[in-house]
Image (cartoon, rainbow, N blue to C red):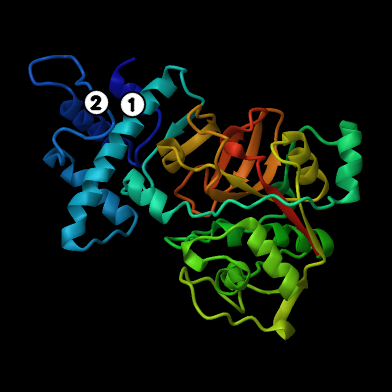
Amino acid sequence: MTLCSIVRTVNYSPRVAMCSRLCATLLSILILPGTRAIQPFNGDTLPPKISKKLDDYWETYKTQFNKTYEKNMENARRAAWEENLVEIYKHNLLAAAGHHSYTLRDNHIADLSTRQYMRDMVKLIPSRRRRLPIEPIVSAALKDPRKIPEHLDWREYGFVTPSVNQRSCGSCYAYSIAESIEGQIFKQTGMLLPVSAQQLVDCSTTTGNLGCTGGSLRNTLKYLEKSKGLMARSMYPYNGEQGVCRFQRDLSVVNITSWAILPARDEKALQIAVATIGPVAASINASPKTFQLYHKGVYDDHQCSSDMVNHAMLVVGYTPTEWILKNWWGNSWGENGYMRLARHKNRCGVANYAAYVKV
């Protein structure tokens, strides 16, 4: 199998012919003239910094993701995109050879350098733990987990709303809690009602969150404990910016009755909560470049430490070997906005701080 035939197994774009030409272009950039050896690449720079050979693909990328840049910013974004393309290329070669369980691809945030990605996309403030009673049904199942299903995906039962894009607002804390509440509303009423993540962005500053600059799951839960209510997304829509709190209690569509934090680093407790309660909000470490560029497969990057968390997602299901997580970065990221994450390793700290809400 040739290098290009391997790369074509993980499409860069829907156009296979373009994928083939891109592969050949990347090879021509990475291979020294007059040799058949690939140049050493340390992941920090792409020689040359910006390759004219990628001009057509850069224009296609901008069109595909509706990108426009200020003139003094485009070169920096282009350079970051080229570096990420090479990372994708190298990783997917190894994945095709059986060395990785997941693949990467470019997406709407593939033009962000590591520094920009960490600044703009991962803004969860880690929560300090607090002992709270967990739901009796969860406590009972922890003692006797035999009735917990081995496979579960709440999407199949209508519990989960379509994918969303938080854009450059660090609102992961708001979306993860809001969408866990949506699952509870569906469980109680059979109606899938999107609730307002924007309300949580605008209003939970009273309990310590920082709007689009970031927030914690605990501060968000404390706000809901105080406000008791949450408006519908249609009444308080998301705009990706922090604004003045416009919550009106008489327009609330749900009343929060209680919330709980699961035992730390306990994946069995997380499984039981997902099975007995519904979708659960979870903190996670989204730092690795492979997380930024994740495409499909079971994510199992050994560099994704469980010692820190900086993002929040929604655990919507599991299998014996993986968690199913919903993200807020739109359909171009991951498996239509979702990630499958390896289980039984607390990979990326998925069980470090998980919470659910009762309505």
- Contact flag, marks 1 and 2 (Cβ < 8 Å): yes
C-alpha span from label 1 to label 2? 10 Å
Mark 1 sits on what residue?
A: 90
196 sits to left or right of 12: right
The amino acid type, in three-letter code, at marker 2 is: Phe
Q: Secondary structure at mark 1?
A: helix
- Relative to 75, residue 49 above or below: above
Considering depth in this image, is 5 or 182 the residue closer to the camera? 182
Q: Say if residue 212 shows up in the picture.
A: yes
Q: Nearer the viewer, residue 317 or 218?
A: 218
Viewport quadrant of the N terminus: top left
Q: Residue at x 31, y 38 (%)?
A: 84
Q: Is residue 124 above or below residue 223?
A: above
Q: Residue at x 55, y 74 (%)?
A: 202
List x then y, in percent, for residue 328.
53, 55
Q: Position of residue 173 (x, y in %)?
A: 58, 58
Q: Quadrant of residue 218?
A: bottom right
- 4 with respect to 162 (left or right): left
Q: Which residue is the site of mark 2?
A: 41
Vertical relation: 140 (above or below) 158: above
Q: Secondary structure at mark 2?
A: loop
The amino acid on which the numbered mark 1 sits, given as a three-letter code, is: Lys
